[in-house]
Image: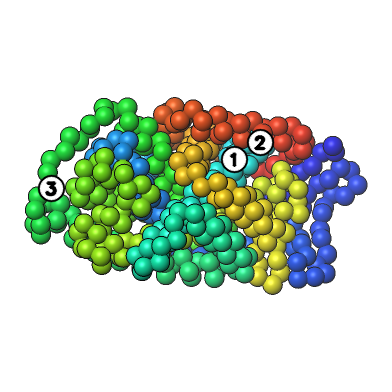
Amino acid sequence: MSDREAPTAGGGANVGNESPVIEATVETDEATITDDSELERTLGLAGGLAIGVGTMIGAGIFVFPGLAAGRAGPAAAGSFAIGAVVALLVALPASELATAMPKSGGAYYFISRGLGALAGTVVGLSLWFGLVFATAFYLVGFGYYAVDTLTEVGVSVGDGFVVPLAVALGVAFTVLNATGTENAAKLQNGVVALLLSILAVFLTYGGLDALGVLGRPSPPQTFVPFGLAPVFTTAALVFTSYLGFAQVATVAGEMKSPGRNLPLAMVGSVLVVGVLYVATIFVATSAFESARLASFGETAMVEVGRRFLGRAGAVAIVFGGLLATMSSANASVLSTSRAIYAVSKDALLPRWASRINLRYGTPHVALGMAGGPIVVLAATGRVEILAEVASFLHLVLYGLLCVSLVVLRRDEPDWYDPDFRTPGYPVVPVLGALASFALIGFMQPTSQVIGAGMMVVSAGWYYYYARDVRLKGAL
């Protein structure tokens, strides 16, 4: 393979000695724009927060409470709090890197410039795989809530319809995102606003009931019934709930005023959602004791709503669950395609994967490469494995992201000029890296093996295809 050089934001790619610059000619609506093309900046702060909050709310509040309570009891609230702390330790360094390099691809772009092409390839492909697993998880959650919705209105279809509904939504969101980022963002903003309104009413009433203000005081439960270890293993499982803040960084190349909006969107989404998670587990475990809550499975929150507000509460939660899982899946499809777009634009994947549709201004090939695997994985219906593999790959990515910040701060290249600086440096990024890697150790062996296998495949791809790539701007 001849040497190849990936472009910077304004440069072409160097292929061998014969063609110093690749520049495609625009001939059709689906032609490749020149290599120095960038996606249009159409997302504001509200759009960034909607992607972060909307992605994280889905699994954390509507799918995990029953599963988490079954593992850790009421201390599952502590599991979500641990996840929030780890996410915040990573969100701060990610914010600095994002304002220094507001490019599509987010963490992949940061790590590839700080740690080089090998780390960039492994992280870029792992980000692709991790987001695919996470999105499939969200889609399966949607399938469960869709079936429950039909049940609430008197149409019993059974769990056999969970997977077909998940697959159908995956296809629909892939098509929606192909027609324009602004369309997807508008849907996201509306869904998140309505969802937060439902949650505010539900958690206020449920919290007052749990404290005995509106109803009877809940019977006391042992806060840590199974010991401390399950609190950490549960934190590893539910960490999938906190992937949304990093997905904001994957669309950094499409955000207006990134120096201001990126840090606010990433850190703000973690704080808002972390509080909502802890409040939700408190309310849920006050409504039912942990074993009973666990017996309700992925839609336990529907029964919590029924416990507090009767059928109206159940219907409200079912509707909220549909909105939440939809918003998570929609934001994740968008972010997955941007990760593929960024990696292919750097020539670590074939360059045709970064083609932009001239009619809609979207990376339609990357969207296809995102949507296809998502639909296939959604067809498995394996909720916990999908969630943990996504967490594994993202925790590796987050740990390396923190390492990248330390490396870039140490070497301080000329182009590194972030608008936001991480407070508490270097303690915050070092703690973020250690916490991310440590949480991996609490996962199921199956998830660890699958995640590690994907990283090995990514490294193998680098040595087969991309070992001669030199990234401009990398240290």
Question: Mark 2 falls on what kind of element?
Answer: helix
Please say if the residues under marks 1 and 2 sit with CB atoms less than 8 Å apart.
yes
**Residue hosting label 2:** 458
Secondary element under disc 1, as helix, strand or loop, is helix
Instruction: For residue 101, say whether it is visible.
Output: no
- Give the residue at mark 3: 218
Q: Is residue 159 left or right of residue 85?
A: right
In the image: residue 49, left or right of residue 290: right
Q: Nearer the viewer, mark 3 or mark 2?
A: 3
Residue 346 in view, yes or no: yes
Q: Position of residue 122 (x, y in %)?
A: 63, 36
Residue receiving disc 1: 126
Is there a contact, CB below 8 Å, between mark 3 and mark 1?
A: no
Q: Residue at x 14, y 56 (%)?
A: 209
**Residue 222 image-quadrant placement:** top left
Task: Work out how far the residue at label 3 is from the one at label 2, CA to CA, in angstroms.
Answer: 50 Å
Residue pictured at 66% horizontal, 36% vertical = 458
